[in-house]
Image (tube, rainbow, N blue to C red):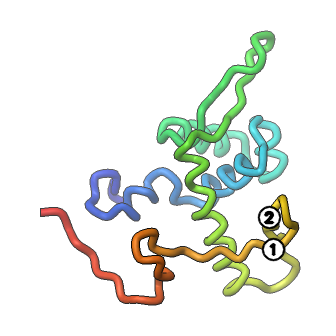
Amino acid sequence: MKNLSDAFCPIARGLTCVGDAWSMLILRDASLGLTRFDEFRKSLGIAPTILTRRLATLTEEGLLEKRRYSERPPRDEYVLTTAGRDFLPVLVLLGAWGRKYRGEGRLTRYLDAETGEEIEPVAVDAVTGAKIGARPIRVATPE
């Protein structure tokens, strides 16, 4: 795949840093409070080499911040940055899509921590209040 980090399309640029399942699942787990390498590895069942690469990329791309929590032995944790926290709505919307179109079997649900109600996410345009996908969209390329 060619490098899309300089593409005009913001979707293409976004996919360069979170465009694989492991990266998105790491961000999901980080948004649920996991911070340590072993926690991610246990939750995901991911090979250590793959996890190391994904954590490095997410850190380089500014979605995670690496923080030292132990000097002896040296140990680091990974915490969401503002950019990482801002990715949570994308994950929740992707989860809702997965529930609707790939929802066979038992699935986890996302609940509002205060009310206990299941979250039913919807993407809306902040300017018009219109639900995204309910009206035609056109793309304007830079000049």
**The residue positioned farthest toward the front in the image shown:** 128
Tell me: 113 left or right of 24: right
Tell me: 22 left or right of 38: left
Give the crowd class for mark 1: few <14, some 14-19, many >=20 residues within 10 Å: few
Labelled pair 2, 1 in contact (Cβ < 8 Å): yes
Q: Mark 2 highlights which residue?
A: 112
Q: Looking at the rendering, which quadrant does residue 40 occupy?
A: top right
**Amino acid on which the number 2 mark rests in the picture:** Asp
Q: Looking at the rendering, which quadrant does residue 142 occupy?
A: bottom left
Q: Which residue is at 48% across, 51% downward?
A: 17
In this view, 134 is above or below 112: below
Q: Where does the image place residue 25, in percent across and percent down from the top left?
A: 68, 56
In this view, 42 is above or below 68: below
Q: Where does the image place residue 2, in percent across and percent down from the top left?
A: 33, 58
In this view, 50 is above or below 72: below
Quarter holding the N terminus is bottom left
Q: Mark 1 highlights which residue?
A: 118
In this view, 135 is above or below 90: below
| CA–CA distance in space, label 2 to label 1 | 6 Å
**Amino acid on which the number 1 mark rests in the picture:** Glu
Q: What kind of element bears circle 2?
A: loop
Q: Give the total of numbered labels.
A: 2
Q: Which residue is at 78% across, 16% downward?
A: 70
Q: Which residue is at 46% across, 59% downward?
A: 15
Which of the numbered marks, if any, corresponds to residue 103? none
Tell me: 85 left or right of 143: right
Question: Considering depth in this image, is 141 or 52 the residue closer to the camera?
Answer: 141
